[in-house]
Amino acid sequence: MRLRTKLGLLGVVTVAVATAAFSASAAGGKPKVIFVAGQVGIPFYTSVQCGAQDAAKKYGIALKWTGSTDWDISKEMPFINGAIQLHPKAIIFSPTDSTALVPIAQQMKKKGIFPITVDAPLAKPVDIANFQSNHFAGGVAAAKAMIKLTGGKGTYLDVDLKPGLPDIGARTRGFVNTMKARGAKVLPIAYPGTDSSKAAQMVSASIRAHPDLTGVYVTHSAAAQGASAAIKQAGKQGKIKLIAFDGDPQQIVDLKRGVYAALVVQEPYQMGWLSVKLAGQLARGEVKPSQVKEEHLLPFFVVTRANVNDQAVKKYFYKASCG
């Protein structure tokens, strides 16, 4: 997953075929839009894809979906550069590096391509629009749920992704600031990246070092898998309260089993739907860039065992595939 691959003859043929197929699909007058996902193959982005494809079908858009299997700017850039070379009307992408992709978005504009971002923001609002969750508020909600469950006693661990990410970092700030304001003791932040095994090791180490560990908060689903495994292995399931972002199918199952105390679920389907709908409107001249609000913060839902079976909540659970 983290190994770089060399693009040989087969890769060149594959790209050529994909390009030809995409060009042919747009020949009927449908505006071309390319969506470069932040990390393909995970339920969050599969849900984004489902929303994007449904919007493309409804609004008559020739959509190409692509992206890397890891949240990594070095792996995402070839996909973005490839998208620019195809000269679509719009490119929707996830900023895996909020600073490095600012000039890339500006380059798209110069080439007459509308840049739209999802899931994470750029360091400067040079895109036409950004669709993401209210990450800070999600962290605050997770902290309030944790305080309600534990009374704020003992020690708490925040498991982030890596330093410097504006979206995931906001989830951490919302949680840590709220917990400390309530007088809770929060350990130094853990940064396992998207490596669930590393997350498990970090959480296991914290459990051994801090017998009074009361709660663990995880900012993304990959690390949540490792955290839950570590807590179960230590025989602390239910004793150490685990709250995590996202609503992957396995996370929902584990919530029902009592592995998680709560989940902070986002709206990835809407991110895909709204961004593709806007791309189509811009491409057809139905709206002007100057008329579009840049920041769009989507709500989230705190799911617990008390409401996990509610029909109003189920529709927000992430998808393993688009059906």
Image: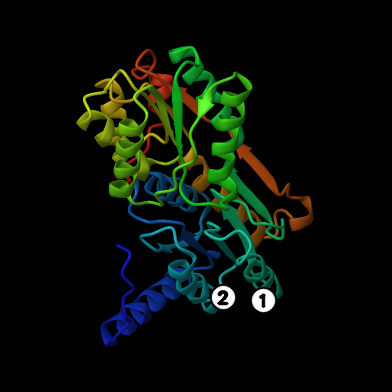
Q: Quadrant of residue 299?
A: top right
Q: Residue at x 41, y 56 (%)?
A: 39
Q: Are marks 2 and 1 in contact (CB under 8 Å)?
A: yes
| Label 1, residues with CA under 10 Å away: few <14, some 14-19, many ≥20 | few
Q: What's under tag 1, amino acid-wise?
A: Lys
For label 1, the residue is: 111
Q: Residue at x 40, y 47 (%)?
A: 50
Q: What's under tag 2, amino acid-wise?
A: His
Q: Nearest the camera: 195 or 104?
A: 195
Q: Position of residue 269 (x, y in %)?
A: 46, 41
Which SS class for mark 1? loop
> Which color scheme does this rendered protein use?
rainbow
Question: What is the spatial separation of the Cα atoms under label 2 and label 1, in whole angstroms?
Answer: 8 Å
Q: Quadrant of residue 123?
A: bottom right
For label 2, the residue is: 87
Quadrant of the image containing the C terminus: top left
Q: Residue at x 56, y 61 (%)?
A: 97
Number of labels in the image equals 2
